[in-house]
Amino acid sequence: MDFMLDPALKLPSQFTHAMLTILASFDLPPSFWLFGLIFVSSNVIKSVCDIGIRYAILRIKYDVQRGLFDDSIDAFFNARWEFFIKADQGKLLNTFNRELGNIGDTMGQLATQLARVVQLLIYLAVPLWLSPGMTFTAVGTAVVLGSPLLLLQKISYQFGLKNTESGNILIGTISETLSAARLILGFGRQQESKVRSLNAFDQHVDATLRCQTMERTLSALYQPIGILAAIISLGVAQQQGESLAQMATLLWSLLRMLPILGEIMSSSVTINSFLPSYEQLNSLRSQAQQLEEVGGSKIFNRLEESIVLQDLDFTYPGRQETLQHINIIIRKGRMTALTGESGSGKSTITDLILGLQIPDDGKVLLDGVPLHEWKQNTFREKVGYVPQEPILFHASIRSNLLWSQSQATENELWEACHLANASDFIKDLPLGIDTVVGDQGTRLSGGQRQRIALARALLRRPELLILDEATSALDSESEKLIQKSIEKVAIDTTILVIAHRLSTIAKADYIYVLEKGRVIEEGEYANLNKMEIGVLARMIRAQQ
């Protein structure tokens, strides 16, 4: 501006004088193109710095996000099964799907704040050097006029809280609807399910619109405040007789500086709306830590004698007593069966043996040592578990099997499939063992899924094989195949069979009959069947 007003630069401004001194040291004569080159070059450097800063902020954001994700998953999976029973699935899914991203954005905002402060100081240095009075007038006006906007913090927090809660409901509804797709189609309730999902969506949209509009409102409201502050400071500078070039320099700096100042002030309000996301994550982690699984230091290698449930009592929170004075012995190398009507406590016993639940009273003993004295996973890694509803991953059969025992050889894979009576149907599939089974194994029949789940359990050559109602949902042919598989592995494996189909446990070495959380009968199948008024005998007759 000085050069354009006076090419001879007879009365240069303070800043231009300093620049001429620098150019003279390099023997460079002043010219319009040289000044233009310096101005453009400085802005190129600024742009490069902006790119570097943006990358650094994103790196910080995702590093923090990954750390929180890692810590949260670690806390959740170090918790007992009780944590997952109590947790709201919608809240869990939304926390990882959306709220964790919000927290990462907040961390990025905090990092951006630091960059803005540095930028602000740089932009502030030149105006303070040229005209302290004009600079203080502009900054003071902007702060005073903008401070009422900080009162919006409480409102933004409430909007953020509503946004998080509605997000939990939406994700929970979608998850529930998709997982129940077969039931919805079977009952012909597609329209009702769609309406329910759309209602949850609309409620979330309403909440998120308010939240995001609040964020933009702060920036929009501060812009005219910044312009007003600049005009007031220019008026002061004019009254003080500042030169046009100096006023142009001051105006350039102020117009760059005041929006940054506004962003710093409004960011505290924006960050406030993200707090509910962090509070929700922190609350879930706190709940998981309160239910942290506590194990001992003893390493479990193999079962030498037996697993004993001794005088065991257990009650789920808020329910009647589930198990009362349970005494059960699962001897090594034998097939032990638990039977009884639904709700008698059979599957709960499985959870207690695996350490997923902690008994209220009594003990679970592995070779005479209480379960809590063992390092939990060293025992679980020696267990093969086949639940009533087999869970397969959306991957190939090979990947599903290797998930259980990653070091297994090709021969070991096929040996496990043969033992589970699964090898024949696997060979008939288009891609054989590399066939993708679909989400939760939906591309396979129930019997095929169950046999793959059994093969997966057998692949690790378990010290204890638990079959929890493994045949209850199968047709007769599939049940026979599973029974044949059980008979094959029963020769040299300790097996715990839980079933209410009595054909599944007919060849068990010892049977415990449960009713309303108590063992009411025990013994060998043949002996229990002979009892005229026995519960098992009555169940056999009923099923026949």
Image: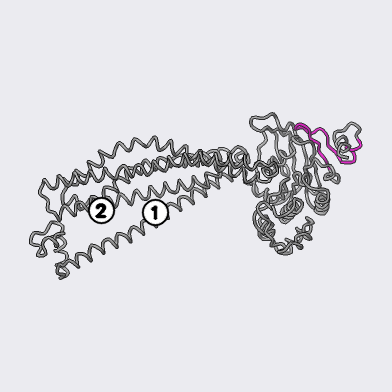
Q: Is residue 145 left or right of residue 299?
A: left
Q: Is residue 151 above or below residue 418?
A: above
Q: Nearer the viewer, residue 356 or 263?
A: 263
- Residue 348, x across and y down, in percent: 71, 38
Please give the count of numbered marks on the rendered protein.
Answer: 2
Q: Secondary structure at mark 2?
A: helix
Q: Nearer the viewer, residue 206 or 410?
A: 206
The kind of residue tagged 1 is: Ile
Q: Can residue 477 be seen in the rendering of this structure?
A: yes
- For disc 1, the marked residue is 57
Q: Secondary structure at mark 1?
A: helix
**Label 2, residues with CA under 10 Å away: few <14, some 14-19, many ≥20:** few
Quadrant occupied by the N terminus: bottom left
Q: Can residue 293 be seen in the rendering of this structure?
A: no
- For disc 2, the marked residue is 122
Residues in magenta, as a range: 510-530
Q: Is residue 325 above or below residue 429?
A: above
Residue drawn at x 27%, y 50% is: 120
